[in-house]
Image (tube, rainbow, N blue to C red):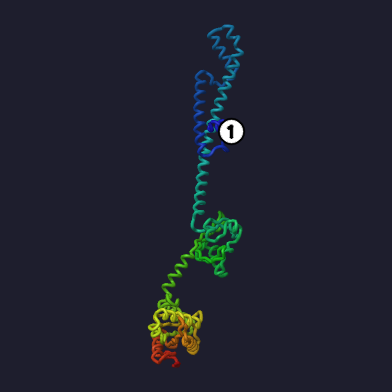
Amino acid sequence: MRKLNLFGSSLRHGPVALYRALDDGRARRMAWVYACFSLLLLALLGAAALYGYYRWESAEELMRLRLRETSQVTASAQAIATAPGAMLRLYQQALIVKLGWIYLGYLLLLSALCVWLGRVWAAQNSSRAAWEIAAGVIEASPDAVVVTDPGPRVIYVNRAFTAITGYSLDEVKGKNPRILSSGRQDRAFYEAFWARLVSEGHWEGEIWNRNKAGEVYAEWLRISALRGEQGKVRYYIAIFSDITARKQAEQHLEHLALRDHLTGLYNRAAFNDALRRTLDAARRRGTRAALIYMDLDRFKPINDLYGHAVGDAVLQQVAMRLQRDVRSTDTVARLGGDEFAIILADVDNWIGAELVASKLAEALAEPMSVQDLSLNIGASLGMAIYPDVTTDEIDLVKHADDAMYRAKQAGGGIQMAPAAEAVKYTR
């Protein structure tokens, strides 16, 4: 019934109603309906032609032909008397035949129109389906997606963006993405960022931003410029993922690999790398660096007497005092057991390095309070100056270690490497 109503409506109101009413599937079905009606009408017209009603002559000519045929059969007055009625019937028959041919053409035209509309709608639906799939993929993506105009002002964000940043589309729409800035990247960073994006059309890297709750998070950002036909930027498309958990895992692994698990100081591997970098920098700048090797004087008897828990607490306090009394540019490491090393960068001369070593020795000479115990530890320090003693990294370590051994043999204090002026302090 619905098809018949649609069929009748299209016949009454023409292609406009058909265009508004049909989609691609219904257009194909209606094309078959029109084709069937066309075949039926064609059959009817063929029957009319078979019985002599296909001619396109006027009704008067048809009447004369029929009268001529009638007169050949009979010349009765009754046939002539009925001529006006016969003329009207013949006129009606001719008109029906003409309208039939016209309607057949109309039906065929509608059939062709339905086929064309079906193809048009199929193409449109295919394109619309592709867009719907793409939109669904973007919304379901675990990576945040941001689309901005050249301003740049936010036009669109997906659900992952809201999950990572806490901002909804309504909160950021029309705003500059700098609302996410954490302040960790300086002006020079953003200048280089935009320079590359404008020149190459894309940028990728790690960046730190701040979410709605004020928490700083790390993200891996990929941003591309989408250009129009004339090469002008129409949109910027940014895709990023939250890598905070990965960064924390990397930092944890780095801590395990480079840090002493008890004191949090650099371990031997990290110390070797730091020493290499410090000496390279001193070589480039033409400055000095100092290496101090240190061994605790009375740690072993305390550890044996009070146990490992007290010994560990002592080592932790030693680490805190050493870090407290050096600069942020210096390096403190625990090489193992009760042996420590300190790297002093940018030392003016051996006197300045000696003052730092004296300060460290005094800090460790102060009693330590551990579990209601007051413990006197003390330390023996050996120091070597680069490049005064040697320019070789391995030799510098050997000289510092030898100087520490001499201080240990002397009962504590500070010993300088032989190439520098020998100054010894004992308690």
Three-letter code for the amino acid on which mark 1 is drawn: Gly
Pick whichever, 55 or 164, lies toward us.
164
In the depicted structure, whether residue 286 falls above or below residue 229: below
In the depicted structure, whether residue 266 falls above or below residue 82: below
Find disc 1 in the rendering and name its residue: 14
Pick whichever, 113 or 384, lies toward us.
384
Residue in the picture at 50% in, 19% down:
50
Q: Position of residue 99 (x, y in %)?
A: 57, 25
Answer whether residue 136 is visible to the viewer in this image: yes
Answer whether residue 353 is visible to the viewer in this image: no
Q: Position of residue 319 (x, y in %)?
A: 46, 80
Mark 1, secondary structure of its residue = loop
Tag count in the figure? 1
Residue 167 lies in what quarter of the image? bottom right
Pick whichever, 107 or 331, lies toward us.
331
In the depicted structure, whether residue 392 falls above or below residue 43: below
Crowdedness near tag 1: few (<14), some (14–19) or many (≥20) residues, C-alpha within 10 Å: some
Residue 294 in the figure: left or right of residue 42: left
Q: Position of residue 182 (x, y in %)?
A: 56, 67
Quarter holding the C terminus is bottom left
In the depicted structure, whether residue 298 falls above or below residue 162: below
Residue 342 in the figure: left or right of residue 168: left
Q: Position of residue 282 (x, y in %)?
A: 47, 82
Residue in the picture at 57% in, 24% down:
98
